[in-house]
Image (cartoon, rainbow, N blue to C red):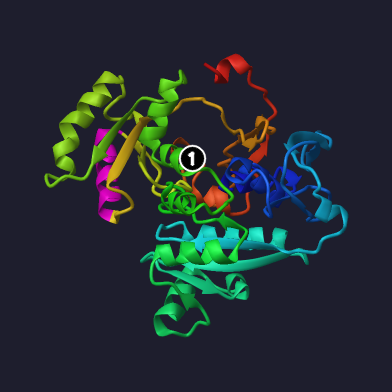
Amino acid sequence: MRHLQRTFRHSAVVNYASLCYVRNVAHLPSHGKVRGLLSNGKPSWKQFLARSSVAFTVTASQSNFKESPVSKVNTVRSPREELGGAERLRVGVVCGGPSRERGISLNSARSVMDHLRCDEVDISAYYVDLELRAHLIPSSQLYSNTPSDFDFKLRLGGSDARTFGSMQELVEQLQASTDIVFPVMHGQFGEDGEFQSLLEAAGVPFVGTGAKASCQAFDKCTAASTLESLGYFTLPSILFETIPGGVEHHLPAMQKWFEEQDIDTENGRVVVKPARAGSSVGVSVAIGLAECQSKVQQLFAEGIDTKVLVERYAEGGMEFTLIVLQGSEGPVALIPSEVELRVEGTNDGEPSERAIFNYRRKYLPTSQVCLCRKYVPTSQVCP
């Protein structure tokens, strides 16, 4: 979901909820009361069964692209729907979480609720706090509060929220009161497969990638190893973990890696990042060995993660996002979106040699994401 926001926020008009739903068809039962949202101009829930198809479209608003079909999902109408059945779909939106991306999670929850709100859908909102306590909250609270506001009111008992004693109790509540769960927690617990594994174990249908794939993708080291095993090229990197000896203990290995990669210890650029965090939280460019060591130490001190990855800086590369939706007939790739950093004339105060697609550029209004104008040959991205 986060990638859908990032890709289409400035480059296209898209039925956001439809795309989010369709990308996770694999986690829905093959029949029953769970239904799919069809992109027909207005939200319309249909019984999810077997065959026939409906095309989804993306309309580019800042390019020469015309409206075009980009994916299909298998759906048919049930006899109940043909007779105009009025049963409402119950959707549980889960947001918050223990990571530093909780604020972005609330924005995601608001966006999802805005797109799903209609007479055919009942939405319940759940907030997970820093201590992994879950709370059923009035959906109206999502539109007027920050994570700090939530936490403060919950501590003082000044909220109408219902608090659950454990994550297992939350899952049991979702199992009993929802037809499908829409998790929008970012970062740890939300994107690392932990919450997904609880839902899978209870047999609760949900929107999003499964537990195993989430775990593999969230940890940058695991993701790189998986890609390498499949024949894809990844940037050279080295992993450091917190140990009693401090970052000084890592200096010999760090210096050896710089030498092996032929990176100038005074002026060579590397990227320092937490191994398990999203939204570019804690990601920065370091110049030289001494600054690299300092930034690794800083990440450990901030407690973002106990594992820090140092990667070789990619000179002159092209950065783009390619979303793949999983349907019952297999994956479908959407139009690529290209990231173009425009440092000049901005107020970031960041020199161009350190510029990256950071947290600020991802989530504040910018013009740095556009539909991909340079189509990359398949041979360059496939093994």
Please state if 126 lies on the left or on the right of 65 as rendered: left
- How many C-alpha atoms fall within 10 Å of the one at disc 1: few (<14), some, or many (≥20)? many
Look at the image and say whether residue 294 sits in the magenta stretch: yes
Q: Which residue is drawn at 70% across and 50% down?
A: 16
Percent coordinates x, y for residue 31 in the rendering: 68, 46
Percent coordinates x, y for residue 128 in the rendering: 45, 65
Please state if 348 lies on the left or on the right of 50 as rendered: left
Q: Name the residue under label 1.
A: 356
Q: Which of 130 and 163 is in front in this view?
A: 163
Q: What residue type is labelled 1?
A: Ile
Task: Report the predominant secondary structure element of the magenta stretch.
Answer: helix
Quarter of the image where one finds residue 328: top right
- Against 192, residue 372 (above or below) is above
Percent coordinates x, y for residue 163 in the rendering: 45, 75
Span highlighted in magenta in the image: 288-301
Look at the image and say whether residue 291 sits in the magenta stretch: yes
Q: Which residue is drawn at 60% across and 36% down?
A: 340
User: Furthest residue to the left?
Assistant: 245
- Against 241, residue 86 (above or below) is below
